[in-house]
Amino acid sequence: MMNFRPVTQWDSVSAWDDDPVVASWNGLPVLEQNVTADVCVVGLGGSGLAAIGALVERGLQVVGVDAGRVAAGAAGRNGGFLLGGPATFLHSSLTTWGTSSVDLYRATLLELDRLAELLGPEVIARTGSIRLAGLPGEPVDDAEAADRVAELADCAALETVLRDNDIAVEEYDGELACFCPTTRQ
């Protein structure tokens, strides 16, 4: 018996869900008894699966659980999204965590390199990332104009910190953004 949430009209479906092999897979079985492990990973999207891989490599017993199918949430629908560093931008994390955030950023870039080598270009497409500051066109009101000014200043602060730490960054050839080639997915 599978325990899946019903699909609604608002759910997005990835193109590969139409593949016969994917469509015919029933998913993982429901846990029907207690399971003992060193670690339990909740959520089997890209991050959860990566965590399981790293934990198993360290010799730990791991159980992974998810409310639905493996990699069928946002990460699975859009093919995943890998960025360098923590969720907060580097210049912000420096304020909170100090210089260790630069080390973390560099470690995540090395992990992206490792994954790209392990999985190949068919799985990991290293394209870079663009940080946009606001919407294109003129601001519609004073609040949006102020938000844009603040966001552009924040983009400039991020660019400065990346350059100061010898992490590649380029000005984006377009409006309101900067391009980070080292976070290539």
Image (spheres, grey):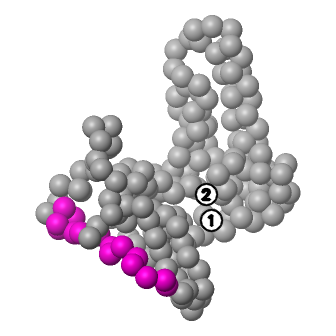
| Crowding near the residue tagged with mark 1, few <14, some 14–19, many ≥20 C-alpha atoms within 10 Å | some
Query: Looking at the image, which residue is at 54% across and 22% down?
Result: 135
Q: Position of residue 45 (x, y in %)?
A: 45, 62
Task: Determine if the magenta segment contains residue 24.
Answer: yes
Query: Looking at the image, which residue is at 32% across and 75% down?
Result: 29
| Crowding near the residue tagged with mark 2, few <14, some 14–19, many ≥20 C-alpha atoms within 10 Å | many
Do the numbered discs 2 and 1 sit on residues whose CB atoms are within 8 Å? yes
Q: Is residue 79 visible?
A: no
| Magenta stretch prevailing secondary structure | loop
Query: Looking at the image, which residue is at 28% across and 47% down?
Result: 7
Image height of 22 relative to 141, above or below: below
Image height of 79 relative to 34, above or below: above
- Reading the image, the residue beneath label 2 is 84
Magenta part of the chain: 21-35
Residue occupying the far bottom of the picture: 59
Distance Cα–Cα, label 2 vs label 1: 5 Å
- Reading the image, the residue beneath label 1 is 108
Q: Going by the image, does 95 lie left or right of 81?
A: right
The answer to which of 163 and 145 lies nearer the viewer is 145
Image height of 11 relative to 137, above or below: below
Secondary structure state at the residue bearing disc 2? loop
Query: Looking at the image, which residue is at 81% across and 63% down?
Result: 100
The answer to which of 54 and 27 lies nearer the viewer is 27
